[in-house]
Amino acid sequence: MKNHLLLSLFLGIFALLQSISPIAWAGVNQWTSIGPNGTTKITDLLINPNNTAVLYVGTSDTGVYKSSDGGATWTQSNGGPLYIYANKLVIDPSAPSTIYAGSYLGVYKSTDGGLSWINSNTGFTATSESIKVLSIDPKNTATLYAGSLLGGVYKSNNGGLSWSPANYGLPSSGQSGIFVNSLAIDPSNPATLYVGSSAFAVFKSTDGGANWQSANTGLTYITVSGPLLIDPSNPAILYAGTYSTGVYKSTNGGGSWSPANTGITSANVTALAIDPSQSATLYAGTKGNGVYKSVDGGGNWIPLNNGLTNTTVNSLTIDPSSPSTLYAGTDGGGLFKFQKVTPDANVECLFNWAESNYPALFAPSGSPSTVSGIYTYRQYSATNSYLGVSSSDGHVYYQGPDGIMQDEGPLSDWLPKASCQVSAPPPVVCLFNWAEKNYASLFSPAGTPDAMWAIYTYRYYSATKAYLGVSSKDNHLYYQGADGKLQDEGALTVWLAKAGCQ
């Protein structure tokens, strides 16, 4: 087997399901704690849309933390007065170094990526400065909305320099106004807003907060204590997280609501996230019951808690460049990361070929493939056997009813036998070709064949002794030059956009 790319993964004992637990990549098909420390109370997580390795977390005990390496390391980001309870973080998508934090002491703003913060509270009163939620207009980022625990909704038209009430039509409650738990902006029409509250469920505005109307049909006596979520592919579809009654859904822009609760009926839903690439896939964080997942638009929910040691979840955030990566902020357990890895198409082809040609060993055929730790495998209950591929050494493994694991040799040797072609997806081929054209001094000779080793699909350039590859583990682009150092060049989706390879 050609050992082209340098890896730091180590090989463990082959063990599947009921045998010894497999060695797992951090966060691959299970939750893994990534800090900032094991006891931090996370309130929110923010991802820089231009560089998804840059993360910010708000906490209720030690302010804001920042990571520039995807959560591997963290530093406190509390320059200035921000050593406080940070309820909500938002980023200016047009200028990602500008960040806002909502706190019990009002709004704070940073224009240098969290290095320093200034108070941005002009216009708030003593009873309205306790900010629970913040939202930023995606089309006009100078416009922000703040939801207060006592003062209702406030609006800024100048990047937080000043704020004014935007409460006409909202009921009064407590000392000053409605208790706002959530605030959502329609990304396709930012003048349309929704507010979720404790006592009055949902309100809607279609004029940028100047006027509000009740949008509560079906939510009588329901407390919307969690988030409001708008389907990015169809803004008429909304989801609401409620106190003790699970998730509710509207398909007509808040005109009416109905339960979307099978499997999550009695949960206190504290967080919601929607897959931007497949909006029928949703995630719900709960108080005490962990995370749930739905793949049918909230029709049915199943737990997704493997490895999640703290089940009170305050926030859920999906990596916009890699929607299979999910972050969960917990109440006293820090931040957790989950990466969903699906089987490689070449490996699936090999499994199908083996079932067709060796039915006595691999029956019943067509069993679903599983990715667990370093293995992609299929289990065959009738023959008590397994067929798998290790991403650590790129070999095929077989385990029969005797429980003995057998190394069947390199996957690259088996794929031609099975007529399963080693080929990169068309967008990756396009990216490789673009790199060769635009960085000819690095990638020569051009047009070298695609190859596969372990988790990498790559091209090798003999003249420059360089490799350019994509990892199926994290969906990142990697480069290795003549010095032999493997470099992570960032999310594949970012590079595909740069290269015009969609």
Image (cartoon, rainbow, N blue to C red):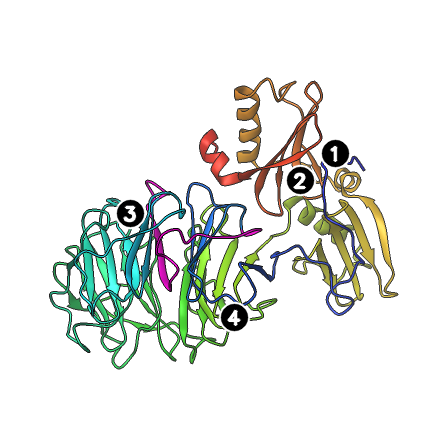
Please state the extent of the stretch shown in magenta in the rendering.
71-97
Mark 3–mark 1 contact, CB under 8 Å? no
| Position of residue 2 in the picture relative to residue 298 (left or right) | right
Our reading of the magenta stretch's main secondary structure is: loop
Of labels 4 and 1, earlier in sequence is: 1
In the rendered image, the vertical position of residue 352 relative to residue 102, given as above or below: above
Question: How far from the left and from the top, in percent, is residue 464?
Answer: 68, 20
Q: In the picture provided, is 347 more to the left or to the right than 40? A: right
| Mark 4 or mark 3, whichever is nearer to me | 3
Q: Relative to residue 136, is residue 2 depicted above or below?
A: above
Q: Tag on residue 198?
A: none
The reply to whether callout 2 and callout 1 are in contact (CB within 8 Å) is yes
Badge 4 marks a residue whose secondary structure is strand
Give the mark, 4 or 3, whose residue is nearer the N terminus.
3
Residue hosting label 3: 138
Instruction: Kindly tell me whether residue 253 is visible in this rendering.
Output: no
The residue that disc 1 covers is 4
In the rendered image, which residue does mark 2 sit on? Answer: 456
The local secondary structure at tag 3 comes to loop
For badge 1, the amino acid type reads His
Q: Determine whether label 4 and label 1 are within 8 Å by CB.
A: no
| Distance between mark 4 and mark 1 Cα atoms | 40 Å
Tag 3: amino acid: Pro
Instruction: Give the label, 2 or 4, closer to the camera.
Output: 2
Q: Is residue 338 above or below residue 456?
A: below
Query: Is there a contact, CB below 8 Å, between mark 2 and mark 4?
Result: no
Q: CA distance from mark 4 to mark 3?
A: 32 Å
Identify the residue under disc 4. Answer: 302
SS at circle 1: loop
